[in-house]
Amino acid sequence: MKKTITVQIDIDTEVPGVSALSKLSDDIFKIAIRKDVIDAYGDGLSVVPIALTHELGHLVGVTFNLPAASRDPRSLDKYYSWLSILTDRSKQEAILASEREAWDVAELITHAGVQRHHALDSYMNVFHQGFERLSRLKR
């Protein structure tokens, strides 16, 4: 598989609006983090990384056609209307499933557990090997 995507991240918590992932073209996406994040959680700027990982969760879902993301009416119809969603229970359920899926991916991003430890150990191995090579060169 080969995929190349471009992501523009725009964080401005002074601007009213809704944080969201937008598809600008087939391979260009924009993540906007807006004031709604601060208003919803009231934790100040500490919630911005959490909101960003959630929107990245949506990006992963769309990029890899995860089940809920592929059924999200907001992704299927560029010109969806909230009125059609508010009157259609199946669309509401599809959106909630997509939101859960994005939070699940965000959880993977923020709590990578074993992968995190393995990755950090691999950096330490690289540093150690590099140090050993430099030591041999200096002799």
Image: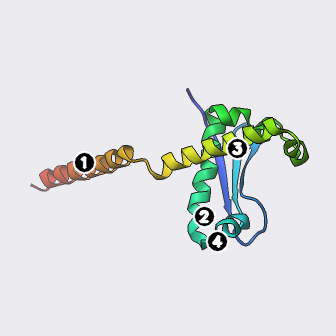
x and y percentages locating residue 24 in the rendered image:
77, 45
Up-down: is 1 above or below 33?
above
Which of discs 4 and 2 lies nearer the camera? The answer is 4
Which is nearer the eye, 128 or 111? 111
Quick one: SS at disc 4? loop
Q: Which residue is mark 2?
A: 48
Which of discs 3 and 2 lies nearer the camera? The answer is 3
Which label's residue is closer to the chain start, 3 or 1? 3
Q: Which of the 4 quarters of the picture holds residue 70?
A: top right
Residue count near mark 2 (Cα–Cα under 10 Å), binned few <14, some 14–19, many ≥20 = many
Quick one: SS at disc 2? helix
Q: Can residue 113 be seen here? A: yes
Pointer 3 and pointer 1: residues touching (CB < 8 Å)? no
Q: Which residue is mark 4?
A: 42
The residues bearing labels 3 and 2 have C-alpha atoms spaced at a distance of 21 Å
Position of 107 with respect to 77 (left or right) is left
Position of 139 with respect to 21 (left or right) is left
Quick one: SS at disc 3? helix
The residues bearing labels 3 and 1 have C-alpha atoms spaced at a distance of 42 Å
Pick the quarter of the image with the N terminus: top right
Amino acid type of the residue tagged 2 in the rendering: Val
The residues bearing labels 4 and 3 have C-alpha atoms spaced at a distance of 22 Å
The residues bearing labels 4 and 2 have C-alpha atoms spaced at a distance of 11 Å
Which label's residue is closer to the chain start, 1 or 4? 4
Q: Which residue is mark 1?
A: 125
x and y percentages locating residue 2 in the rendered image:
57, 29
